[in-house]
Image (tube, coloured by chain):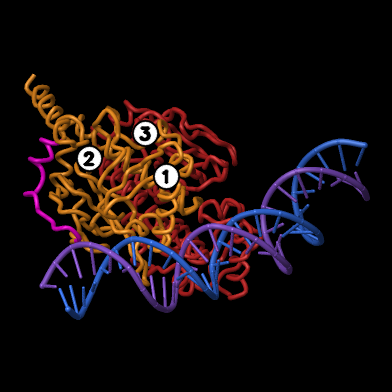
Chain colours: A red, B orange, C blue, D purple
Amino acid sequence: MLERKTCRGAESAAQRTGFRVGCSLKTCLRSAADPARRVPAGAHFVHEGAQAAPCYWLESGWAVLFKTLQDGRDQIIDIHLAGDLVQPLAADGLTASGGLQALTPCVVSAIHASRWERLRAGCKPVRDACDVQAAAVSARRGERMLRLGRGSAAMRLAYLLLELHLRLGAGAAAPPRAFHLPMTQRQIGDAAGLCSVHVSRVFSQFNRDGVMTTRDHTDVELRDIGRLCAHAGVEIAALRRAIILPQ
Amino acid sequence: MLERKTCRGAESAAQRTGFRVGCSLKTCLRSAADPARRVPAGAHFVHEGAQAAPCYWLESGWAVLFKTLQDGRDQIIDIHLAGDLVQPLAADGLTASGGLQALTPCVVSAIHASRWERLRAGCKPVRDACDVQAAAVSARRGERMLRLGRGSAAMRLAYLLLELHLRLGAGAAAPPRAFHLPMTQRQIGDAAGLCSVHVSRVFSQFNRDGVMTTRDHTDVELRDIGRLCAHAGVEIAALRRAIILPQ
DNA sequence: CGTCGTTTTGATCACAGTCAAGCGCGGTGG
DNA sequence: CCACCGCGCTTGACTGTGATCAAAACGACG
């Protein structure tokens, strides 16, 4: 059938380009979304409490969803990678419950309410793809919440590295042991609930122990996944099933 | 129209019974769900990592979604009240990313995959109701994450009290300043990322300061909402908009 | 009446935050 | 070309919040 054909085409395109959105979702999104917007690294493109769209499609780049305390300190709620759908709306259905900031140059498309509704109304595969992404978001935020509430600094950081390791390898056969981490230690601290000084200390310790190495402050290599898992309190196969989309 | 009529009926029923699921959702759920199951207080009715349904409808009672660290310590990810839809599935679409435990006797109905799909496929109001609940879940977990990562013990606990205060008053004109809190201090600590000893200390301090009073260890009265908000770092009207369903 | 779980309180300790100083690097302007 | 500046990282010293350990009071329940 025609739809089936579109589906296959999109699937292989997704694999080539590293998108993790399944099946025909990518082509559907392209037709439903506003024209893609190019966002420079560091730019805030959605503001906490301000009006926002129900869904943003992050075509390429890294972005963070974060919230700010009254005294100005930030907490990164989630890190979003290329291909992710970001749904920032609060319960009022109008305003964003957090801000969105680009970590790298990004290509972002907003999907407004009526189109977002129609997109999912029409097509079960799209609805399923959205559901499974929402489940992944919820599961990984839960893992991070567990460690924010109960984990040590080393556990929080080891988990962060492992989560990104797995997510970056989502499409591939094996996740990349070395990758570019486009965050300052201050931002890493904002994600892990730590001050930047302590991030530096724990990373130094990881380096000394041969668990990881950092180069140029933004490239990390995980040298001992096993010990990293021990620090993170993670069984890696189980974590993969929990937070990585099937296939 | 007939559907409109059903809708209105369900709406007033929802208001009478304190359900916060909008419009015709309740009647739709009753037809889609498995027979309601009665769960005693303290029982674990979904287990982390085990197979689970995509959605549980908590008809009455309180339940928590929690995750456990390898050393056995728990973190409560979310507290669910009567009328909530709980979606515990991880990204694999099969297993639960956390356990579900009843805090009070509960009435729970599982909604299995095919029915959950059909329920939303057919009816836009239902889809909208699910969306807005999902947004509320996401927003309040974000608020809690912010405070787990960045807040003091007093901030975490003050926020927890305020969140429940607002959620319990969702349907009513004014939220209840006094309510029954069916959790031990250990469980409160599990929600706030604190040990039970420290929960006791902070609550004692709140009592001495006249911010709140506790009776029988499970009834709380918020005596000074303003100072509680100051502790929590919250502007209460904004928080209400962010985490409480409209109307 | 004894047992178990919960709360309270005190004493001590450790992890992580804060403050501060120094270093390396890249960009900018004299 | 070099000097300067700003930003991010590193390291040290000190501090404080909250965890841990321990003991006692209390209440629910068999």
Q: Amino acid at mark 2?
A: Lys
Q: Amino acid at mark 3?
A: Arg
Label 1: chain letter: B
Label 3: chain letter: B
Which residue occupies the foreground of this view, B205 or A185? B205
Q: Residue at x 40, y 58 (%)?
A: B199
Residue ID for mark 3: B240
Residue D16: where, in percent of width, then height? 59, 58
Which residue occupies the foreground of this view, A192 or B186? B186
Region of the chain picked out in magenta, as a range: B26-42
Vertical relation: A31 (above or below) A229: above
Residue B74: where, in percent of width, then height? 34, 63
> Mark 2, residues whose alpha carbon is within 10 Å: few (<14), some, or many (≥20)?
some
Q: Amino acid at mark 1?
A: Gly
Instruction: Specify whether A8 is left or right of A33.
Output: left
Instruction: Specify whether A96 is left or right of A220.
Output: left
Residue A166: where, in percent of width, then height? 43, 60
Residue ID for mark 1: B210
Residue ID for mark 2: A124
Viewer-nearest of labels 1 and 2?
A: 1
Q: Is residue B107 magenta?
A: no
Mark count:
3
Locate the N terminus of chain A and report the quarter of the image it occupies.
top left
